[in-house]
Amino acid sequence: MMITGRLHTRSRDDIRVVALSKREWRISDGRIATDDGLSLIGFIDENHGVYEVMEFVDPVEYARFGNLERAIMHFVTSRPG
């Protein structure tokens, strides 16, 4: 089951990154109001230099990256042509 109400294409400008701690970030879609739970699209957790991504899709997707910007870019679904 897909999460309804989610905007399926996101550019880098649509991504909102909020630091929760020195090693944790909440990732939201900035086009959706922050008080709407559908704005939350995932989390990034840094663990010993590896950035672990959890994205809320169906099924939940996990990935690892070597730096924070690449981890953030995982949430971008539309890239400039």
Image (spheres, rainbow, N blue to C red):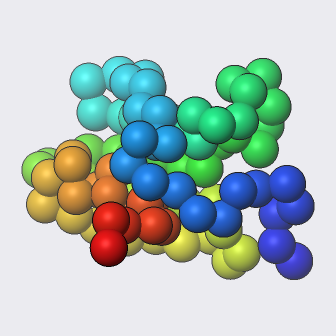
- Judge whether 44 appears above or below 65 on screen: above
- The answer to whether 45 appears left or right of 60 in the picture is left
Q: Residue furthest front?
A: 81
Which residue is located at x 38 percent, y 49 percent?
Answer: 12
Which residue is located at x 22 percent, y 64 percent?
Answer: 65
- The answer to whether 13 appears left or right of 81 in the picture is right
Quadrant for the C terminus in the image: bottom left
Image coordinates for residue 42, horizontal then vertical, percent = 55, 50
- Judge whether 5 appears above or below 37 on screen: below
Image coordinates for residue 49, horizontal then vertical, percent = 12, 50
Which residue is located at x 14 percent, y 52 percent?
Answer: 67
Which residue is located at x 36 percent, y 67 percent?
Answer: 79
- Judge whether 16 appears above or below 69 on screen: above
Asked where in the image residue 8 lies, by quadrant, the reply is bottom right
- Residue 31, visible in the rendered structure: yes
Asked where in the image residue 71 lies, by quadrant, the reply is bottom left
- Residue 52, visible in the rendered structure: no
Asked where in the image residue 25 lies, by quadrant, the reply is top left
- The answer to whether 46 appears left or right of 37 in the picture is left
**Observer-nearest of 64 and 27:** 27
Quadrant for the N terminus in the image: bottom right
**Observer-nearest of 47 and 81:** 81
Image coordinates for residue 26, horizontal then vertical, percent = 49, 35
- The answer to whether 76 appears left or right of 35 in the picture is left
Image coordinates for residue 9, horizontal then vertical, percent = 58, 63
